[in-house]
Image (tube, coloured by chain):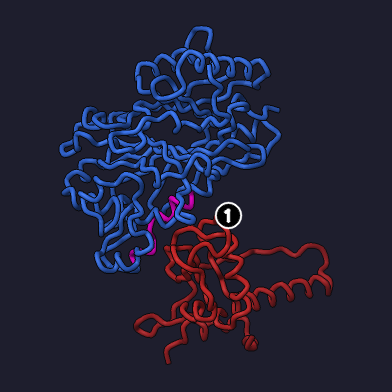
């Protein structure tokens, strides 16, 4: 994981650009309004810092795999398609999801990528590196 | 009287076949949607079981007499039993679907070749007399319909419906290979062992727009781009419909067939659901009561999701989620409900606490 900026507000270098080169902010937002409970201790500060670092590790570097409708079919009974089509639908055997998640965690190629999986007629993949080379990273480099 | 099958859903051994060997379902159907009144007691269960047995003794088991199948909804299990519901509640299954997701205690599916008999049975169960169930069950709604050659053309006044069409869209759905076997949909273990699950949707169908298409166009939308009207009429055992060639054929023709898309849900070539659907003119509008039986509601969800062929539009720009995509542009799902169908021995208020 590359070091994160020291400034919490240093977001813009991560924004993708629209077709005219304008930075595009994230599409969805939440403002969580918080109250402090009691007298905060060092443990509270550590808990909060750890949680935020965990989220940073998970979402900046990780992969997001979206299954479609799950079935109890035996693993490797179908082919598996990996797609970044946001409107993908279909079915996916739980065993096939598990078979895909292990290499998705292990493969550096999946870092920073979101994708969906569904079963289709055919043979299951043998070369996951090749499968995961297909999806594009979620964040594109900002236009110069 | 011969012993009846343990499985309530074991109907097919009684079906006759048409002239080409295709199974012919009973011609008339009722779905009696039921609500539980008060707290059911042992006497209520005995009254219901006695009434169903009386009907079974009175009428031959099969389309010539009467077939029944009683399912219980998630609400029944949650409110009146100590079991967690063995079935999932209904869900919308496409971005363009907005069905009423029904919470109905029980659904009794009645079928017969004699329409008047279904009226009689409904009145006997929910009217005055020795079989009356109204002390324990309310008849919330009776949904009716028909299936079989001649009935659709007789009862639905839309130009172009073939006179021998068994269902609203003009094709046979009950091909042996297109249906999961009753054995495959029977639950092997757990509280519903020997039973199955039932999904019931009310689907409005735009038959006027469907029959404004020529027959070749209807055949390719129903089956696959490589299926002609003549091919469709000749189907007897199965309609595999090029399910394994969907991406290539979609890219070539700009179109996906309904059977082609749904065929991709098969496991080792075997479909997941057993269709018990029938045409209806309830409320004066043509439609289908789509009843499907499957080992798990997940099997229905998988089949329905695959029918969306959501990936097809990535193969050709003329294909969208509904246009040039099977029958998706012609159907509108109005409601959906799910039920657990216990084996016959447990059909009356199953697992009552």
In the image, B131: left or right of B148? right
The correct choice, above or below, for B136 with respect to A56 in the image is above
Q: Is residue B199 magenta?
A: no
State the residue at coordinates (58%, 24%): B36
Badge 1 marks a residue whose secondary structure is loop
Q: Residue furthest top?
A: B129
Q: Position of residue B254 (x, y in %)?
A: 26, 64
Whether residue B152 sits left or right of residue B38 in the image: it is left
Magenta span main SS: helix
**Is B261 placed above or below B56 here?**
below
Numbered disc total = 1
Kindly identify which residue carries mark 1: A72
| Residue B311: in magenta span | yes
Image quadrant containing the C terminus of chain B: top right
Q: Where in the figure is residue A120, as x and y percent of width and height?
A: 45, 63
Which color was chain B given? blue
User: Residue B247 or B31: which is nearer the viewer?
Assistant: B247
Span of residues in magenta: B301-313
Q: Colour of chain A?
A: red
Q: Where residue B92 appears, x then y in whole percent?
A: 46, 48
Quadrant position of residue B292: top left
In the rendered structure, the residue with mark 1 lies on which chain?
A
Q: Quadrant of residue B346?
A: top right
Residue A128 left/right relative to B204: right
Q: Is residue B156 above or below residue B92?
A: above
Q: Nearer the viewer, residue B209 or B265?
A: B265
């Amino acid at each position: 994981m590359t070091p994160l900026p020291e400034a919490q507000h240093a977001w813009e270098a991560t924004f993708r650009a629209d077709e005219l080169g304008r930075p595009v902010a994230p599409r969805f937002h939440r403002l969580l309004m918080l109250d402090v409970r009691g007298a905060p201790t060092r443990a509270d500060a550590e808990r909060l810092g750890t949680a935020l670092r965990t989220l940073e590790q998970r979402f900046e570097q990780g992969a997001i795999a979206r299954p479609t409708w799950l079935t109890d079919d035996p693993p490797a009974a179908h082919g598996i398609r990996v797609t970044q089509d946001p409107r993908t639908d279909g079915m996916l055997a739980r065993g096939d999801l598990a078979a895909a998640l292990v290499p998705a965690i292990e493969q550096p190629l999946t870092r920073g990528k979101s994708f969906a999986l569904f079963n289709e007629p055919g043979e299951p993949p043998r070369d996951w590196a090749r499968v995961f080379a297909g999806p594009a990273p979620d964040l594109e480099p900002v236009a110069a | 009287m011969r012993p009846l099958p343990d499985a309530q859903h074991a109907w097919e051994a009684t079906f006759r076949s048409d002239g080409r060997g295709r199974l012919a379902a009973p011609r008339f159907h009722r779905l009696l949607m039921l609500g539980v009144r008060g707290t059911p007691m042992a006497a209520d269960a005995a009254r219901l079981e006695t009434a169903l047995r009386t009907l079974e003794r009175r009428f031959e088991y099969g389309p010539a007499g009467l077939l029944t199948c009683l399912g219980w909804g998630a609400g029944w299990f949650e409110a009146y039993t100590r079991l967690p519901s063995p079935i999932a509640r209904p869900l919308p299954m496409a971005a363009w679907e907005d069905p009423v997701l029904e919470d109905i205690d029980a659904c009794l599916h009645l079928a017969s070749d004699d329409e008047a008999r279904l009226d009689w049975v409904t009145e006997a169960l929910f009217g005055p007399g020795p079989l009356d169930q109204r002390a324990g069950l309310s008849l919330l709604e009776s949904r009716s319909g028909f299936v079989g050659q001649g009935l659709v053309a007789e009862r639905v006044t839309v130009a172009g419906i073939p006179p021998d069409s068994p269902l609203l869209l003009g094709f046979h759905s009950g091909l042996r290979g297109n249906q999961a076997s009753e054995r495959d949909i029977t639950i092997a273990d757990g509280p519903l062992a020997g039973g199955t699950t039932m999904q019931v949707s009310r689907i409005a169908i735009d038959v006027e727009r469907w029959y404004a298409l020529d027959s070749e166009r209807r055949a390719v939308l129903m089956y696959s781009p490589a299926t002609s009207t003549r091919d469709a009429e000749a189907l007897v055992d199965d309609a595999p419909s090029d399910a394994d060639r969907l991406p290539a054929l979609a890219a070539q023709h700009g179109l996906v067939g309904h059977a082609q898309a749904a065929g991709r849900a098969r496991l080792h070539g075997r479909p997941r659901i057993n269709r018990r659907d029938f045409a209806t003119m309830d409320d004066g509008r043509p439609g289908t009561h789509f009843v499907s039986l499957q080992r798990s509601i997940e099997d229905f969800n998988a089949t329905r999701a695959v029918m969306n062929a959501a990936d097809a539009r990535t193969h050709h720009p003329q294909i969208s989620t509904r246009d040039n995509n099977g029958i998706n542009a012609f159907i509108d799902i109005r409601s959906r409900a799910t039920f657990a169908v216990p084996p016959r021995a447990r059909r009356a208020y199953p697992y009552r606490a």
